[in-house]
Structure formats: structure tokens, C-alpha cells
Image (spheres, rainbow, N blue to C red):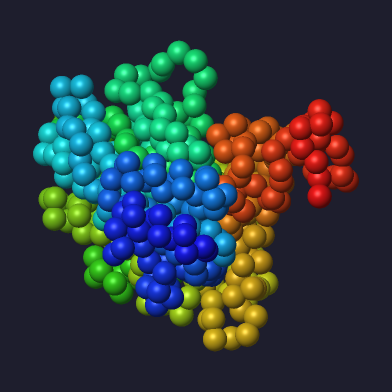
Amino acid sequence: MKDRFLEELRRICGRANVLTNPHQLETYASDGLLHYRVRPPAAVLPGTADEVRRIVRACFLESVPWVARGSGTGLSGGALPIEDGLLIVLSRLRHILEIDLPNQRIVVEPGVTNLEISAAVGPTHFYPPDPSSQVVCSIGGNVAENSGGAHCFKYGFTTNYVTGLEIVLADGEVVTLGGKELDLPGYDLLGAFVGSEGTLGIATRITLRVAPVPESWRTLVAYFDSADRAGQTVSDIVAAGIVPGAMEMMDRLAIRACEEATHAGYPLDTAVALIVELDGPAPECDERFDQVVALCRRNEATGVRVAADEAERQLIWKARKAAFASMGRVSKSYYVQDSVIPRTRLPDVLRRIDELSESYGLSVANVFHAGDGNLHPLVCYDPTVPGEAEKAERLAGEILEASVDAGGSITGEHGVGFDKKRYMPLMFGDDDLGAFQRLRCAFDPQQLVNPGKVMPTPRLCGEVPGPYREHPIERAGLAERF
Ligand SMILES: Cc1cc2nc3c(=O)[nH]c(=O)nc-3n(C[C@H](O)[C@H](O)[C@H](O)COP(=O)(O)OP(=O)(O)OC[C@H]3O[C@@H](n4cnc5c(N)ncnc54)[C@H](O)[C@@H]3O)c2cc1C
């Protein structure tokens, strides 16, 4: 990276906020998916949206590619740096800009954490999408990944809560999409940006819808001796017209890890634990809750634990939310997979995961948002055994294939990023990928923004896969290949 360019960055946001020391840069070499590491040549930590704009403009003028990073908890390598590019770290943009409760809106900078948003609008309101990483992950990262969480079955995902964005485009231009209002006329560019995994620009100002805190909660955890019975209970609850705030499942190995970490009182000999939480007006909650308990029993639950008070409710959730972090108790390392299947195919796909686990000789712990059919198989391996990490990755890949074969998707909420771009052709044909690429190029014609992510192969704007064909702008005499 040229000295002149680095000097310009220092002028923009101060010497202390431009990192080039390899030891400091190690911190930024990977996101939450530690398999991939690339130490960037430099990282810059702007403190204002205007500094972001000036940095992006400087990159554009020098043709320097860049990657945006929030808190670095992503699990698909979306914020993985690139060898010749700048890392733009947004964690210093931490201001709550406006709280507008009469209109149920909050306006924030991208580095604000998910949990800080609920804290800012509490105790009357909350921000529903609740990734388990919510204590630390940034709202900018949530927007880029269209993040979900346990309560998205009832409340919806990030995309259902973003009403407005200020974005810095690849050439440094600042544009505004949406605002506080819903459903503006014209193409849904806001919808295109949410979930675009940092490939269309940087969100510097985010307007979100918040919801009133429900009047009451009722929470239980039911235990089953098979995934079939637990899966049937989930289907029966939905078929009964009940819309729980959350329905979460964990299998035996996940329960063991969580229990060792939190001592929440889950029995270690149970095959599956199903957490069901209802929220809403107390009389409705109570009546529906009795129905849920009856459905658990009809499906031969071996036990039903009802949270007696808020402390017990929090304890039940503490265990579930610790699932990823506590896997270190049962395995030296693990690979987090994220796929979606139709809810009714849960038992079939879990059986297939068991078969794969046996044939590869690796344990797989399962944690999932059962209501949404969003699986998180955690493939356990020992990184000190040569070849085992690669084996875990292959197993995880076969789980994706099984999910797509069952009518599902290669990702539910963790995104495609760097890790899963090779699986995109499992779901999308060349025409689909070409359409995605043209959208991306409309935002970033020079492909400076998070290159090498999401799309399976690097392509030029307007280029189609296969043998070389003349590009339209070459045909028009505006560019030549060299
Ligand atoms: C223990 C653990 C539990 C998790 N649980 C969940 C869960 O329940 N649900 C879930 O959905 N995810 C979960 N995740 C994944 C992760 O926390 C989310 O994807 C989160 O949204 C990432 O936010 P971040 O700030 O860490 O983003 P980063 O990892 O820093 O970046 C993620 C992507 O966002 C882009 N980006 C970041 N900021 C911006 C911005 N301002 N503008 C444009 N692009 C930007 C980056 O370029 C990158 O592509 C979990 C992760 C961990 C480690």
C-alpha cells in the first residue's frame, strides 16, 4: 500500500487510527470463522460518517479495494480482509443519533451493538432481531448479513426492521435509501442492500423500527427422546395457529456443552431439548401456553420445565445463547454450519446428519431455530490431527447439499461471505448469478467493495461465465482487453 495513500488516511482520521503494525493487524485477520486468516496491509478506524466517506473516496481515486468490518463476529468470512486491500473498521461509530418512540423508530451509527439498541429504547420498547452474538455484534454487520435470532420466527429478520439507510457508495458518494416511513415507491434498493454482505457500500446511518415490549412471556423447555417427536411438536404448535416468539432446539451434545458452561439445569441424558416461548397479552399467553404444554405431552415429552419467574426464563435462554461459545467444553474446535430446510423435513435431515457424522467419524452438535427450519450443525474436530479440519469442512459441505436436496437453502442467517461462495451454484444457475453480478456492478462498477465474497468466481461487470466472449463495452470500442 503506497505511503502517499496511507498519509492521506492519516490526514483523514488521525495517525492513531491508521494501523499498519503487523501485531496490531493480527486482531483483524479473521472474523468469527477462524478457518480463514488474511492479515490486511492496513486497517483504518474512522470516527465519523464523513471520515468514512473520505476514506472510501481516497480508495476510489487510488483504485484500492476495501472490506468493511463491524465487530468481526461474522461466521462466513464476510469481513475477511484481502491481501492488497484496506480494512475499514466501523466500531468507533457508536452514537445513537435519534430515538423517536412515538413513531417507533431509532436512528443509529453502524458500530452500535445489537443489544445497545434494545437498551436505548427500553423499558417500553425493544429491537426484536436477536442474534446470540447480540452483546457484541454491530448493527451495521446485522444489516449487511440480514441477521436473525431466536425471536425471528414471530418477529421477522433484520430486513423487516430497517426502514432507512445512509450509504457511502464505492466512489465516495453518499446516498439515502428510505427513511422513517415504510414502503417507498420505486425499486426496493433498501431490500437489496440489507443482506448484501458488505458488497454494495458502507451503511453509515441506520434507521430501524422498534417494537413495544410484550405485556408478558411464558417460557418452557420440553425434553424428548427423539428429534422426530420434538419436530412433530413444532409442526403441531404451528398447525394449531400458535405463533410463539421463539422455538429453539438443541441436541444431546449441544445440551452437554451448554450445561457445562451455564449449569442451567438441562438433563444430560435427554436426546433433544425444545424451548418454546410465547409472548403477548397475559390472558392469551396463558391459554396458548396450556395448549403448548398439552402438545408437548401428546408427543411424549419426557419432561416439561416451565420457567417459574424471569430469573428462570433468563437461565433457560442463557444456556441456549451460549451454545456456540460453550462448544469448547466438548471439542477442541468446531465448524459452524448454517442452512435452512422446510420445517417438516427436520427429522429426515437430522438423520442424514447422523449418518454423515458416523461415516466421517466426527461428532456433530445441533442447535437450531426450529420454527424457521434454520439449522446450525456444529461439526467438531481436532485441529491438531492432520487433515481433520478439511474433513470437518467436507462434512459441513455435505450437510448443505442435504439441506438443498430437502428443498432448503445454503444459508439461513450467517451469509455466504467467503466460505460459502463455492456452494452458490447448488442453488443458482448462471443466469441468476449474472443478475446478482449486474446488481452489484450497478453499485460498484470497479469492484472495489469486498471483492472475492458471495459470488462463486470473480467476474467482470457484465461478463458471463464460460469461454471468452467479447464484452459489450469492448465491442463498443470503449475498453480493450490486455
Ligand atoms: C457466538 C456467535 C453467535 C452468533 N449467533 C448468531 C445468530 O443467532 N444469528 C445470526 O444471524 N448471526 C449470528 N452470528 C453471526 C454474526 O454475529 C452476525 O452475522 C452479525 O450480524 C455480524 O456482525 P458484525 O458486526 O460482527 O459484522 P462483521 O463480522 O464485522 O461483518 C459482517 C459483514 O458485514 C459487513 N459490514 C459490517 N459493517 C458494515 C456496514 N456498516 N456497512 C456495510 N457492510 C458492513 C462486512 O463487510 C461483512 O461482510 C453469531 C456469531 C457468533 C460468533
Where 158 sits versus 274, above or below? above
Q: Position of residue 473 (x, y in %)?
A: 77, 32
Q: Residue at x 49, y 53 (%)?
A: 67
Q: Residue at x 47, y 57 (%)?
A: 5
For residue 72, side relative to residue 37 (left or right)? left
- Residue displayed at 52% across by 19% down: 187
Can you see residue 312? yes
Q: Nearer the viewer, residue 229 or 422?
A: 422
Tell me the residue at 52%/63% (across/down). 1
* Left or right placement of residue 145 versus residue 301 in this view: right
Q: Quadrant of residue 342?
A: top right
Q: Residue furthest front?
A: 4
Q: Is residue 124 above or below residue 262?
A: above
260 vs 225, left or right, is: left
Between residue 53 and residue 457, name the one nearer to us. 53
Count all numbered tags in the image, as a single digit: 0
Q: Position of residue 114 (x, y in %)?
A: 28, 47
Residue 148 appears in the figure: no
Give the residue at the far top of this rendering: 185
In the image, residue 249 lies at what x, y percent?
Answer: 41, 53
- The x and y percentages for residue 467 are 88, 46
- Front residue (pair 54, 324): 54
